[in-house]
Amino acid sequence: MRALVIDDSRTMRRIIAGTLQPLGFETLEAADGREALDILEAGTEVDLACIDWNMPVMNGLDFVTAVRENRTWRGVTLMMITTESEHSQIVRALAAGAHEYVIKPFTPDAIRDKLQLLGLVGLEESA
Amino acid sequence: MSLDINIALDDFSGTDPIWVIAEEVFTAMVDGEPGFLRPWEGDQAELTDPMYAWVDVHGALPGRVLLTAERETVEHLSRALLAMGEDEVLSETDMADALGEVANVVGGNVKALVPDPGALTLPQVAHERPEIDAEGLMYELPLDWRGRMVVIGLWRLL
């Protein structure tokens, strides 16, 4: 399984990658939505994208919209990981095509639980 | 310490919501367990070589969430966030990014308390205190993280 971690903060990318790697993910990183689209457009296969909302160049919501408009990437699971915690923002992200939504701060267990719900992590990883 | 700002306090049953946010952020992101952050007791000493990180919240009540800590504290905080050992090289960029991300997460959660919030700006980090009207200070919470002071300030943008 390969995950693309999209966040303008290198710190947060490292935290999220450090959470995903023990769950069996190979991780790639992008600092904004445009950089992430470049990776997908280059033909890199990705199973999961973890997406921050507020980023320069292209924000997370625009990235989700762009991915959902391209059928080539319909197999990519989209999980927002963001500080945007208002209900209206969560609804916007899910309506745009995000599969899951995690609010920062998060614990590694919260990420693992969401990935189990999405079927991307088996129960054995929770041991 | 009173919270003299116009945010929704009803759900907190008297608990300082900024403290709740700070404790959640440090427990989840920095320490991995509770108990290392507590309210600062005693006088606030002047910080040596301080660093500042802030995000602005636009909307009906435009404001700024400002974190202040000594550079040495930021170094320890960054190593904790990045799970880096003492022997690993930590750059100024890493430290600025780490402090900025803490401000971003605190600020994002504060934004959720504000009625009709607008956009949250990207975090900014500096060694100089950002210019801000002194009369705009609404609330300040000095914290003790592992014996080191971290201050969270909420400012109204006038």
Image: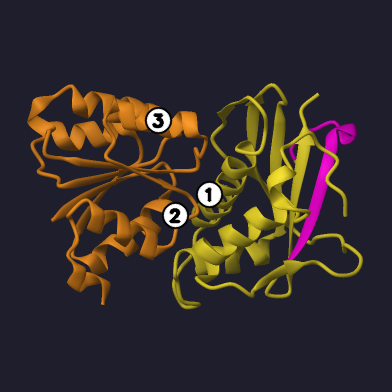
Chain colours: A orange, B yellow
Picture coordinates of residue B40, whole percent (x, y): 81, 67
Q: Chain of mark 3?
A: A
Give the spatial CA distance, label 3 vs label 1: 24 Å
Magenta residues (range): B130-144
The correct choice, above or below, for B36 with respect to A54 in the image is below
Picture coordinates of residue B152, whole percent (x, y): 73, 51
Q: Residues within 10 Å of mark 1 (few under 14, many from 20)?
A: many
Residue name at image x 33 percent, y 63 percent:
A19
Kindly report which numbered mark, 2 or 3, lies closer to the viewer in this rendering: 3
Q: Secondary structure at mark 2?
A: helix
Q: Chain of mark 2?
A: A
Query: What residue is disc 2 on?
Result: A11
In the visual, does A45 lie left or right of B69?
A: left
- Please state, as top left, top right, bottom left or bottom right, where the N terminus of chain A lies in the image: bottom left
Give the spatial CA distance, label 2 vs label 3: 27 Å
Query: What residue is disc 3 on?
Result: A91
In the visual, does A120 lie left or right of A127?
A: left
Q: Which amino acid lies under the numbered mark 1 shown in the image of this protein?
A: Glu
Q: Secondary structure at mark 3?
A: helix
Kindly report which numbered mark, 3 or 1, lies closer to the viewer in this rendering: 3
Would you say the residues marked 3 and 1 are in contact, meaning their CB atoms lie under 8 Å apart? no
Q: Which amino acid lies under the numbered mark 3 shown in the image of this protein?
A: Val
Residue name at image x 24 percent, y 54 percent:
A117
Q: Which mark is residue B101?
A: 1
Check if residue B133 falls in the magenta segment.
yes
Q: Which amino acid lies under the numbered mark 2 shown in the image of this protein?
A: Thr
Residue B72, quarter of the rendered image: bottom right
Would you say the residues marked 1 and 2 are in contact, meaning their CB atoms lie under 8 Å apart? yes
